[in-house]
Every structure is written in structure tokens, then in C-alpha cells.
Image (cartoon, rainbow, N blue to C red):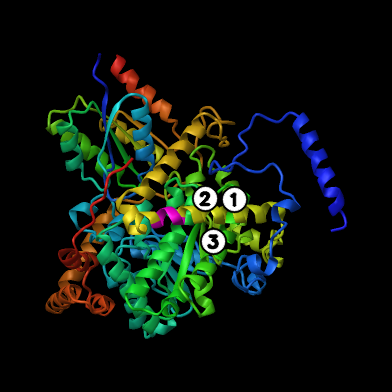
């Protein structure tokens, strides 16, 4: 049996809005993935460390405080420094359109905005790993 | 009732006819997933005792409203929540809102301020001024209210774990302009229980957090009598995904817990209860929301009188602020949000709110632009001046449906109170993750209902526009805000009397180890420009930090 896709759902930064992160965590779990949730108020260092320790395939970042332009690129940089650039990183939250492009340029594979159907996230992750 | 005799046969005929007809394939439930009766009729409220259950407006149990005159006396306070960038950026927005007819102020703080970090702390990087205004010390508070008369306006501050400190900054800012504490009015949210439950912006563990709260209750009842000391909040519980009944029940349960904490701390209930206020969400299910507000007033009044022995009538009044539901807004076709918000605002007014924030259409995309916030404010003004709903108090009273729904919600809330008691109270239930799990479950159920199209959201899962281009102006926060805020903070630290600041922090630390009222020390710290971060660090060393139990 192939190994289940392992996902770390993480909340970088200081905001406490965890509804989206938890809904996505539940949806990925129901779709057969193994999900680890970090809890709130994580630094990029803590997230990169957990991602490597837990040997995940995917990291999902959720942030609603507007600090995404600081937090997301730093997570990407730390993962690269740890030799973990194979980990797919996606994100969600209140991210203005013009930031989406910049984040995707920094290595974040996809940003899912408000109103995203969780099945689209599942489909996306599965498609990456079926390639 | 002259037609009483024919009621039975008429109803029977109606039921027969109804059952023969075909219905649309729609889920006839509220947005909370609660089934709705197809029709309410006199039988639903046959035993309703008007005086016992409803009362006239301004009369126990206040189901029909807390004041006899309601909106004929005065409109609700139109209070738009605003804050971004530096204190001077936000000061400019406040002047804009006041110039356009807003009648109260409401401060949104950035995440570092909410979590007790100074702007130049490592954890603040990227967050300064982003989702609210950055306030580090009394200096920023002075700038925030520059040109605004703090004795002539009331200010609400959405601040919880560090509420004592921001209140101290505010009072000191007014004090420096010669306004005595008893002439300043406003609200601090100061509702830490719902932070553990839903909003998740905590600092200290529950016990010292509750001590800070009871210190504030005692201090304000003596020195700041016009201050609303806790705004017991269902808003965030609902936004985190709860149902309407959960919002109602968990919020009131938190309220009871504060009352009990005050009583345990030795305060007479009538000394602090009149200054407790509430903060509810206005979601989309119109009647469910109205019933929620009416049930809330009735439950609170009854409990305060019967269980906590309040004698002062003001202790029985559930006064509340309402904010329309941010979580119902869509990033798709954002102009539709104006319409959603208008219906939500109307439900709050029909439910008898004392104050209202209407969301801006662009809030799923960014902080509100000036244009968007102006439309939101205009929405309230249209409700107040054009729709005519202000002319009569509690216009939906006596409606078979609304009265039956109000009763249903009260009953369902009582079931939750029992459950919470079985846990041993709110704090114990938080530690067991009860609320967090209930809310998480409801949020996920709702998401699944939307994805299965059992719930339709216009523009999101139906009536979509392919290739839609969002075409509304958005507010951008420049990264330069963080740099300038940090520079100003560092300059202030150099200029103040550092020996004095250190002495006051030391006194605060000693007081925290004892049992004296900490507000006095915190105000002393504020006055000599100790920063929020310094005060929090001092208290953290004594109180420790809260660790979240993990559930999803």
C-alpha cells in the first residue's frame, strides 16, 4: 500500500483565526491524508522544524493577519536551508491578488483564497503526487 | 378568540392540503442547520404570558428591549471598527468617520498589540499595523486620539489579554488633557474566556487572567463608572463557526462565569454587573438572529435576578453591540456583500441592539477602503432614517414564529448550560476542549453543506461569474509603517525617564505577586511611558503563559 500523503497544517504569525486551518485539516484527513496540525502562533522556524521532523510531503499555511508576505517566504527559505525543498507548500487566508503572484514566485505552490472548495485543495494535492 | 372553534378544522384542512402539494428540493433549515417549522400558528404561543415572558420594553424580563423608548429615545450608536498602520494613520480615519456622521469610535489593534508584543519584538515582524493600529505606549494613544474630545465621545477597544494596559493608556491620555476618569466612557472587550474558546488571542492562563479582569471590575466601578468593563462576546464564537444557539449559550455562560468570578473576588454583584455589556454577531438567517437577541435578554435578566440575586435593575439589562458577520462575506462578487450586510444590520436593529458595526464589502480581501467603509456606514443611516423600523419598539413581538423561535433558542441554550455545569464550569469545559470541539464540528458541517450545495451562497457555489475580475479599490499597508513605528518606539524609550519606568515595573511585579488591585500599578507604568511589551513581560514572569490544548 502506498504511503499516505503527510500534511502539516500550520498557523504562522500571531492571529488566532483557526477556522479555515481546522476545516482544511479535517477535509484532508477525510480525503485519506495524514494530517498534523501545529496549533497557533507558530514562527516560521517552528513550522520548518516540524515539517522536517514529521517528514511531511506538504505544508499548508493559513494566515489572516496580513503578515503573509513576511511569513510565507521565510518558511520557504528555511525549508530550502534544511534541504527540504521537495516539500510542497500551499497557503490560504486573506491574501490580496497582487500578493498571490509574488508568493507563487517565492516558491509557494498555490494560494487558496476565501470561498475555496476543500475538494479543490484535495484534488490539487493529489494531482501533484500522481505526477 | 372568536374563531377558536374553527381553529381545529381549519388547521386539519391546511395540513391535508399541504401534504398533497409538492415542495422544492431545498434544505429547510436555518444557516445553523436547525430545522424550521413550516408554519407557526396560535397553538405555538397559546400559553405565552405577556408580562412574565415578554414584558413591556424597559420592563423585566426585557425580551422586548432594555429601554422604554428604544430608538425613539436615541438611535443605536453607529460604531465602525477601525484601525490600521500607525496611530496617526488611524487618527486620520477616525476624523473621516466622525466627519461622515459616525457617533462612536471603535479601535482595531494590530496583532502584536493584541498579543502583548512591542512593535520591535521579533514576533511582531511583518505584523505591525497590518490588521489594526500599532499601539506600543501612551505616546501612541495620545496620537491616536489627537483632536478628539475624549469626554464627548465613547470609545470601544477590542482588546482582551492586555485590556488593563490599553485601558490604562486611554485613561492616561485623557488624564493628560485634564479629563477626569469619571468623565470618560467606553468599552474594553476584556473577554478572555472567549479567547480560549474561539478567538485564540490569549497570553496568561485562566486564573491570573480572571484576576486581572476582577481588578478592572473593581477599579472601574470606583473610578471609571461610565466604562463598560467587559464586552462579553459571541461574535468570535460565531465567526469561528458556531451555530446561533451555541453563540447564544456559550456567550451567556461566559457572562455567568464573570459574574461568579466577581462574586468570588468579594464584589457585590450590583457593584459591577451594570457595566457588563455584550457583543453579538448578526448572521444571515434573519429570524434566527432576531430570536437570538430577544432570548439573550430574557435569559440574562432571569439569571441575574433569580440566581445571582441582583437587585439593581441595571444589572439585569443585557445591553449589546452587534457586528454583521464577516464570515458570510464572499471574495467573489464582493459588491453583493453590501446587500448581505444590510439584511444583517436590519436584524440587529429589529433585535434591539444598542450599537452596530456594519462590515465593508471588501473585508475578505483586505482592510476596508474609505469608500467601502462609507457605504457600510451609509447602510446604517439608511436603516435608521429611511426604513421606518425605528418607529416602534420590538416590532416582531407577538409573531407566532418569532416568539416560538425565541422560546426554542432559550430552551436549547439551557441544555448547553446544563452540559457546561456538568463539566464543572466554563474554565473546566475549555480545558477539556468542549467548546472548541463543538465549534470546530459545526464549522466543518457547514463547509460540507456548502460544498454539497445544501446551502447556497450566491456568487460562490451558485450564480458564479467565470473569469470574474475584482474591481474595487483596496487599502494597502506599506511595509514602511513597521519601520517608522519601530523607530518612533526606540526614540521614545531613549527620551523617557528610564529609571522611573524601571521602578514602576518593579512595583508592578511585586503587586502581581500579592493581591493588590493591579490597575493602579498599571496606570503608574503607563504614565511614565512603560511600553505594553514591558508591562506584559513583567506580568508573564509572575503569571506564566497559557498553553493551548490541541483539537481539530
Front-lying residue, B97 or B213: B213
**Disc 1: CA contacts within 10 A as few (<14), some (14-19) or many (>=20):** many
How far apart marks 3 and 1 lie (CA) works out to: 12 Å
> Which element carries disc 2, helix, strand or loop?
helix
Residue displayed at 36% across by 33% down: A26
- In the rendered image of this protein, does residue A112 appear above or below residue B224? above
Asked whether the residues under the numbered discs 3 and 1 touch, taking CB atoms below 8 Å apart as contact, a structural biologist would say no
Is residue B405 within the magenta segment?
Answer: no
Quarter containing the N terminus of chain B: bottom right
Which residue in the protein does label 3 denote?
Answer: B296
Q: Main structural element of the magenta stretch: helix, strand or loop?
A: helix
Tell me where the magenta segment starts and ends, as one range: B417-421
- In the rendered image of this protein, does residue B248 appear above or below residue B10? below
Q: Which mark is residue B199?
A: none
Confirm whether circles 1 and 2 share one chain. yes
Answer whether residue B111 is visible to the viewer in this image.
yes
Q: Earlier in the sequence, mark 1 or mark 2?
A: 2
How far apart marks 1 and 2 lie (CA) works out to: 7 Å
Residue A99: x, y in percent?
35, 38
Residue A81: x, y in percent?
12, 33
Front-lying residue, B71 or B551: B551
- In the picture, measured across the screen, residue B462 lies left or right of residue B420, that is right
> Which element carries disc 1, helix, strand or loop?
helix
- In the rendered image of this protein, does residue A94 appear above or below residue A60? below
> Which element carries disc 3, helix, strand or loop?
helix
Residue B340: x, y in percent?
58, 47
Residue displayed at 64% across by 68% down: B52
Residue displayed at 40% across by 70% down: B259
- In the rendered image of this protein, does residue B25 appear above or below residue B62? above
Asked whether the residues under the numbered discs 1 and 2 touch, taking CB atoms below 8 Å apart as contact, a structural biologist would say yes
Q: Which mark is residue B288?
A: 1
Q: Which mark is residue B244?
A: 2
Amino acid at each position: 500500500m502506498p504511503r499516505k500523503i503527510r500534511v502539516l497544517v500550520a498557523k504562522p504569525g500571531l492571529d488566532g483565526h483557526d477556522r479555515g486551518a481546522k476545516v482544511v485539516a479535517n477535509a484532508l484527513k477525510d480525503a485519506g491524508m495524514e494530517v498534523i496540525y501545529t496549533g497557533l502562533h507558530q514562527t516560521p522556524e517552528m513550522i520548518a522544524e516540524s515539517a522536517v521532523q514529521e517528514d511531511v510531503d506538504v505544508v499548508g499555511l493559513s494566515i489572516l493577519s496580513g503578515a503573509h508576505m513576511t511569513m510565507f517566504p521565510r518558511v520557504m527559505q528555511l525549508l530550502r536551508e534544511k534541504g527540504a525543498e521537495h516539500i510542497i507548500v500551499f497557503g490560504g487566508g486573506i491574501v490580496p491578488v497582487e500578493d498571490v503572484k509574488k508568493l507563487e514566485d517565492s516558491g509557494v505552490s498555490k494560494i487558496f483564497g476565501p470561498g475555496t472548495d476543500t475538494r479543490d485543495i484535495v484534488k490539487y494535492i493529489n494531482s501533484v503526487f500522481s505526477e | 378568540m372568536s374563531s377558536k372553534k374553527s381553529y381545529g378544522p381549519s388547521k386539519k384542512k391546511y395540513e391535508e392540503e399541504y401534504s398533497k402539494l409538492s415542495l422544492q428540493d431545498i434544505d429547510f433549515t436555518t444557516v445553523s442547520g436547525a430545522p424550521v417549522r413550516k408554519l407557526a400558528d396560535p397553538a405555538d404561543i397559546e400559553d405565552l404570558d405577556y408580562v412574565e415572558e415578554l414584558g413591556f420594553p424597559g420592563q423585566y424580563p426585557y425580551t422586548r428591549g432594555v429601554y422604554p423608548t428604544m430608538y425613539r429615545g436615541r438611535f443605536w450608536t453607529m460604531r465602525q471598527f477601525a484601525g490600521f498602520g500607525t496611530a496617526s494613520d488611524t487618527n486620520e480615519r477616525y476624523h473621516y468617520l466622525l466627519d461622515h456622521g459616525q457617533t462612536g469610535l471603535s479601535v482595531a489593534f494590530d496583532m502584536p498589540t493584541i498579543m502583548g508584543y512591542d512593535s520591535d519584538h521579533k514576533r511582531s515582524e511583518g505584523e505591525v499595523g497590518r490588521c489594526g493600529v500599532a499601539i506600543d505606549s501612551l505616546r501612541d494613544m495620545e496620537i491616536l486620539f489627537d483632536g478628539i474630545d475624549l469626554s464627548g465621545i465613547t470609545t470601544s477597544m477590542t482588546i482582551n489579554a492586555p485590556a488593563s494596559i490599553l485601558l490604562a493608556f486611554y485613561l492616561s491620555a485623557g488624564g493628560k488633557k485634564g479629563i477626569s476618569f469619571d468623565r470618560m466612557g467606553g468599552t474594553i472587550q476584556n473577554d478572555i474566556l472567549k479567547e480560549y474558546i474561539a478567538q485564540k488571542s490569549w497570553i496568561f492562563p485562566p486564573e491570573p487572567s480572571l484576576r486581572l479582569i476582577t481588578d478592572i471590575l473593581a477599579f472601574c466601578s470606583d473610578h471609571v463608572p461610565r466604562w463598560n468593563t467587559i464586552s462579553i462576546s459571541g461574535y468570535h464564537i460565531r465567526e469561528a463557526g458556531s451555530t446561533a444557539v451555541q453563540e447564544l449559550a456559550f456567550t451567556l455562560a461566559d457572562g455567568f462565569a464573570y459574574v461568579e468570578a466577581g462574586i468570588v473576588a468579594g464584589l457585590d454583584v450590583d457593584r459591577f454587573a451594570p457595566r457588563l455589556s455584550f457583543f453579538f454577531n448578526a448572521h444571515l438567517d434573519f429570524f434566527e438572529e432576531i430570536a437570538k437577541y430577544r432570548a439573550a435578554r430574557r435569559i440574562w435578566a432571569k439569571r441575574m435576578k433569580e440566581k445571582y440575586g441582583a437587585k439593581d435593575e441595571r444589572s439585569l439589562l443585557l445591553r449589546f453591540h452587534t457586528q454583521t458577520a464577516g464570515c458570510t462575506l464572499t471574495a467573489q462578487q464582493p459588491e453583493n456583500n453590501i446587500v448581505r450586510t444590510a439584511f444583517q444590520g436590519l436584524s440587529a436593529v429589529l433585535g434591539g441592539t444598542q450599537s452596530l458595526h456594519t462590515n465593508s464589502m471588501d473585508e475578505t480581501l483586505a482592510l476596508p477602503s474609505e469608500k467601502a467603509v462609507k457605504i457600510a456606514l451609509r447602510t446604517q443611516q439608511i436603516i435608521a432614517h429611511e426604513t421606518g423600523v425605528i418607529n416602534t419598539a420590538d416590532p416582531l413581538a407577538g409573531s407566532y414564529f418569532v416568539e416560538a423561535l425565541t422560546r426554542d433558542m432559550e430552551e436549547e441554550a439551557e441544555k448547553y448550560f446544563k452540559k457546561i455545569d456538568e463539566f464543572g464550569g466554563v474554565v473546566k469545559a475549555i480545558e477539556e476542549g468542549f467548546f472548541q470541539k463543538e465549534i470546530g464540528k459545526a464549522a466543518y458541517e457547514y463547509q460540507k453543506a456548502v460544498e454539497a450545495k445544501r446551502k447556497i451562497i450566491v456568487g460562490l457555489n451558485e450564480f458564479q461569474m467565470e473569469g470574474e475580475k475584482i474591481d474595487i479599490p483596496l487599502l494597502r499597508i506599506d511595509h514602511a509603517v513597521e519601520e517608522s513605528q519601530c523607530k518612533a518606539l526606540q526614540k521614545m524609550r531613549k527620551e523617557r525617564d528610564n529609571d522611573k519606568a524601571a521602578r514602576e515595573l518593579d512595583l508592578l511585579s511585586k503587586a502581581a505577586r500579592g493581591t493588590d488591585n493591579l490597575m493602579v500599578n498599571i496606570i503608574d507604568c503607563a504614565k511614565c511611558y512603560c511600553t505594553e511589551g514591558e508591562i506584559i513581560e513583567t506580568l508573564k514572569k509572575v503569571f506564566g503563559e497559557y498553553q493551548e490544548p490541541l483539537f481539530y
